[in-house]
Structure formats: structure tokens, C-alpha cells
Image: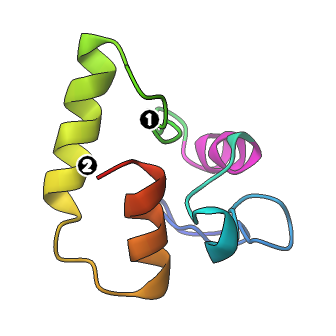
């Protein structure tokens, strides 16, 4: 069993993550897997819509601020997907 908070077993090949070419990040399936491995987790998928509600807009703003220093290929792709 993976340790708490681990992303072990959640892969692109298994459908839990998107490939870099499609924006990186986790899929709905990957979020379900993670939440099953980590009960009580509140992990959610990316905020990708153009005009999100106020709470989702705040989540996007927070993610963009936290991830501003990401320089790797997956990180840059995820930031594009989130519209940072």
C-alpha cells in the first residue's frame, strides 16, 4: 500500500494523469484513485473553464500563485491547462 499522500500507482498509462501534450494534471479517474487511497482528501481536478464561479476563481488564483516557480515540462503544461 502506498504511503499517505503518495501519487504511487497514478500514471499517464493507467489514465490517472494527462500526458504533457494534453496539459498534464490529473484526470477525474486519477482524482478518484487518489481519494480512495487517502480518505478525507479534498483533491479536485483543474479549474479550466474561462469564467469560473467566484470560489473556483479563487482556487485558480491560489494554484497559479503556488505554481509560479514551476519550470519543468509537466509543470508548465499544467499551468497552461489552468490558464495561469
Which element is circle 2 on? helix
- Residue holding disc 1: 47
- Location of the N terminus by quadrant is bottom right
Query: x%, y% of residue 3?
Result: 53, 68
Query: x%, y% of residue 63?
Result: 25, 49
User: Badge 2: how crowded within 10 Å, few (<14), some, or many (20+)?
Assistant: some
- Residue holding disc 2: 63
Most common SS among magenta residues: helix
| Viewer-proximal residue among 37 and 84 | 84
Q: Is 65 rendered above or below residue 47?
A: below
User: Badge 1: how crowded within 10 Å, few (<14), some, or many (20+)?
Assistant: some
Tell me what residue is drawn at x 76 percent, y 71 percent. Answer: 12
Tell me what residue is drawn at x 62 percent, y 75 percent. Answer: 20
Q: Quadrant of residue 68?
A: bottom left
Tell me what residue is drawn at x 42 percent, y 28 percent. Answer: 50
Q: Residue at the far right: name it.
A: 14
Q: Is 80 rendered above or below residue 49?
A: below
User: Is residue 74 on the magenta stretch?
Assistant: no
Number of marks in picture: 2
| Direction from residue 61 to residue 48 in the image, left or right | right
| Viewer-proximal residue among 5 and 22 | 22
Q: Is residue 54 visible?
A: yes
Q: CA distance from mark 1 to mark 2?
A: 9 Å
| Direction from residue 30 to residue 14 in the image, left or right | right
Which element is circle 1 on? loop
User: Decide: marks 1, 2 in contact (CB < 8 A)?
Assistant: yes
Span colored in magenta: 29-38
Tell me what residue is drawn at x 38 percent, y 87 percent. Answer: 72
Amino acid at each position: 500500500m502506498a504511503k499517505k499522500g503518495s501519487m504511487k500507482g497514478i500514471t499517464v498509462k493507467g489514465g490517472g494523469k494527462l500526458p504533457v501534450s494534453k496539459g498534464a494534471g490529473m484526470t477525474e479517474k486519477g482524482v478518484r484513485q487518489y481519494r480512495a487511497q487517502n480518505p478525507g482528501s479534498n483533491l479536485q481536478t483543474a479549474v479550466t473553464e474561462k469564467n469560473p464561479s467566484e470560489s473556483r476563481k479563487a482556487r485558480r488564483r491560489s494554484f497559479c500563485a503556488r505554481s509560479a516557480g514551476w519550470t519543468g515540462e509537466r509543470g508548465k503544461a499544467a499551468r497552461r491547462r489552468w490558464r495561469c
